[in-house]
Image (cartoon, grey):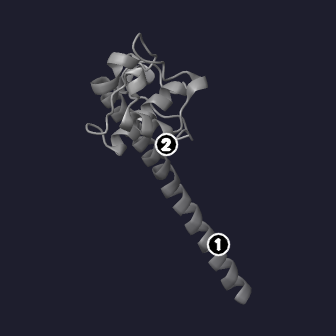
Amino acid sequence: MRLRILQSALLTLAAMIGVSALCTSPTAAAQGSADIYKDVYNGWKWWHVYCYRCHGQDAVGGALAPNLIDPNEKLPLKDFLIIVRNGNPEKGMQAWDKLLDDKQIGQLFTYVRARADKVLPPGRPDEVGPKKGPWIPPQGWTGQK
């Protein structure tokens, strides 16, 4: 009798864990993917307000500023925040701390990292996915490396 009760409890627990995993994993993954997409898209918007004039439309650089998607020149988020906040007067870059907060700079970083990691093709993020649909972040890509 005890064995049967224990088996029943274990089967019930296994079923609950399986159902819970089925219910939460795809949702959590989709939510994480949606959050990353929002950060990339918002970063792209900030890019086109403040950065593209010097760094190029798709972060490829220009006559005034360097290419930010060069795989050999990837900056960690910490360094990116410092440079964008404070600027780089020796190289002609102004400080953006009065116009952009850390969240917005982080979104810029995520956009630039998506381009540098070659997971985001050139163009507007909501028009570069399959059949001109939204771009979908690759599974496991967080943009915060």
User: Looking at the rendering, which quadrant does residue 82 occupy?
Assistant: top left
- Above/below status of 54 relative to 125: above
Q: What residue type is labelled 1?
A: Leu
Q: x, y percentage for residue 124?
A: 36, 22
Furthest toward the bottom, the residue is 1
- The residue drawn where x is 41% and y is 10% is 63
Query: Is disc 1 placed on a helix, strand or loop?
Result: helix
Which mark, residue 11?
1
Tell me the quarter of the picture where residue 30 sits: top left
| Cα–Cα gap, marks 2 and 1 | 48 Å
Q: Position of residue 109 (x, y in %)?
A: 44, 35
What crowding class fits label 1: few (fewer than 14 Cα within 10 Å), some (14-19), or many (20 or more)?
Answer: few
Question: Could you tell me if residue 128 is visible in this image?
Answer: no
Question: Mark 2 against mark 1, which lies toward the viewer?
Answer: 2
Picture layout, residue 14 above or below residue 117: below
Q: Nearer the viewer, residue 74 or 8?
A: 74
